[in-house]
Amino acid sequence: MIELVDISKIYKNGEQETVALKDVSLTIEDGEFVAIMGTSGSGKSTLLHILGCMDKPTKGTYLLMGEDITHFKSRQLSKIRKSKITFVFQNFALMEKYTAYENIELPLLHRGISTRQRKKIILDAVRQLDIESQLYKLPKEMSGGQQQRVALARALVSGADIILADEPTGALDHATSMELMSILKEYNQKGKTVIIVTHDKEVAEFADKVIRIEDGALE
Amino acid sequence: MMSRFLNYLARNKVQIILVMGLSIISLFLCVLALTNSFVFKAQIKDLKKIFQTDTDKIGVLNFSYVKDENRFGDDINEIKNIIRKDYGFICGAYTESYIYFEELWNNKVYLECNEEEYKGTFYEEYLSLSDVIMVDPEMMDIVDCGILKEDLLPITIGDELYYPIYVGSDFKHIIEIDDVLTSDTFGTKYIVKGYIEDTIWFSYYDPIEFPASPMKHKFIAPFGNEERTDSMTQLSTVNQIFIKGNVLKESDIRQIEKLASQKDIKISISTIEEKIQQFKVDNMEIMRNQYSFAIVVMICSMISISSLFCAFILMRIKEYGIRLAFGESKERLICTMVGRHLVYISIAMLIVILFAKKYFDATVLGEFSQLYNKSLVGYAFPITILVSILYTLISLIPPIIMINRMELVQLVKEEEI
């Protein structure tokens, strides 16, 4: 379970302060599919970054699976990102010089998993997502939809229970977007908690719960 | 792991070639400067080791003019005797020459033994020649080679006069104690009285400026009667005549110089310490220049490597962001970078070691090669390894700071990952 209590995020630039989030409190149960919606600059990405342990709140409390991680150091947050939370980004965030296989392998490295075991996990994931034929291609050799599937495979192989997706369909056409959302829904039904940031109502309809944010505050 | 590393090498070949190139150049200069410096120090240390006492108590006669070379044998013996008797100094000379011993002329084992030693020198065509150091017995009170002055006194057996000779340990299996060796020059007969182990002697070319060499392939014997008075033999002792006293008084030195001038021989006497100091002064300038050049190149190379790493980090900023997002810590990114750089440096070091060895083998004179090898392996390489680690760590400080200051959210936003 994810629980945010009175979370605020203020960015300082010299003497100027920008409030990105203002006393946000929310609870997301395990296995929920949540969509965070809001206009550009509303603070939805900041919220996602805090949820994903990529950024720390200025104020408030963040409880992840009952543990207060608000004041965790960056190394502890890395561990959480490695084991409990995974990401799907709008522009796929694939490493361009690396093949699909190497991109998918990234979360499995430095975990003490043997090469053979890693290969098995990766092949299982690519089979499920139907991108076996893309495995040894570079991102630039794939279509947007295929790249996003590789990004999704990378997120899934980590075994994390929470999938955070920042505008995952932003760079995809309508049909591919729906296909991707169906896959996410499928994984949600298998027990994964899925949190997506989107401004697309049709995409948000896949979610069990929609959280709207405006000017850094929940509506 | 290995295949990932090889893939990494293939992907980053430009960076690797640049880093390795810079490292190889600067580490090679470092090895060069260190080796030369240690060779120089080892040479002086060896030289001091040859003498029994402090080098300021030993003088050397520097000859600048000899009018009548035919009389030199008699004149120099007279001067040496006056120095001994009137001034109370120990005075002795040596020369190193290649002579034939009749008994070894056709000794196959002896010729084979010389073959390896003389290879590449003028003497490789004359394998039956023997490298003999001829000395005044008084030299044994000046140098420390494990032989006493008394050990070099002539021996009479029956009617025959024999001179003791000591043989380098390389010939132990060929020449036995009490064997007789006959010089083909003057017919001087020598009787083997012992072997020379682990001892060094002055260079054939110059006692001060060239490194001492082991005596294991040489012989040492006193001058025979003929050699003692033979002008040609004695002329070869020029600049290799030493005096030793508790105090080398300036007034005594001037008088000895005056005494020589009365015989139309111009000499000056300087202490070995003065000679060493002069040698140091002459070489220090070269050393200083080499060190300065090596340090400047290393600093430039460190700055370049630092800049290269920073530039490559900027080029791979998206990758760093992705890696951090998927749970890699900054510490791991830094460790990976340092580890990789240490691998490059190790490879560069290996190349430098091989190249330096080849370089010195090809450029260093035979007399120096042993000293160079000793300095290279014993000092220059270990120190360069330490320097290279330091060099790596210093050059990586700016890139490490850069990674440490990375803000994951900024990377995510800037790169729109």
Image (cartoon, coloured by chain):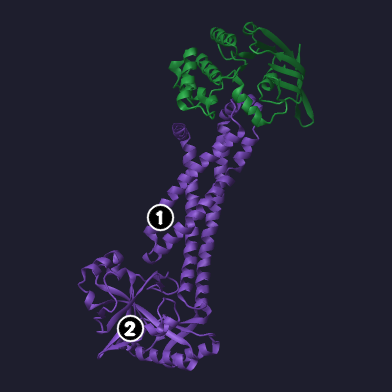
**Residue B168 in the figure: left or right of residue A12:** left
Quadrant the N terminus of chain A occupies: top right
Chain bearing mark 2 = B
Q: Chain A: what color?
A: green
**Residue type at numbered disc 1:** Lys
At label 2, counting other C-alpha atoms closer than 10 Å, the crowd grade (few under 14, some 14-19, many 20 or more) is many
Image height of B347 relative to A48, above or below? below
Residue at the (48%, 94%) spot, across then down: B86
Residue at the (38%, 67%) spot, across then down: B367
| Residue B195: percent from left, percent from top | 34, 74
Is residue B248 among what the camera can see? yes
Mark 2: secondary structure: helix
**CA distance separating discs 2 and 1:** 39 Å
Chain bearing mark 1 = B
> Of residues B110 and A11, which is closer to you in this image?
B110
**Residue type at numbered disc 2:** Thr
Q: Quadrant of residue A90?
A: top right
Q: Quadrant of residue A63?
A: top right
| Residue A40: percent from left, percent from top | 69, 16
**Residue designated by label 1:** B357
| Residue A121: percent from left, percent from top | 49, 20
Precedes in sequence: disc 2 or disc 1? 2
**Residue designated by label 2:** B233
Image height of B116 relative to A153, above or below? below
Mark 1: secondary structure: helix
Colour purple maps to chain: B
At label 1, counting other C-alpha atoms closer than 10 Å, the crowd grade (few under 14, some 14-19, many 20 or more) is some
Image height of B232 relative to B395, above or below? below
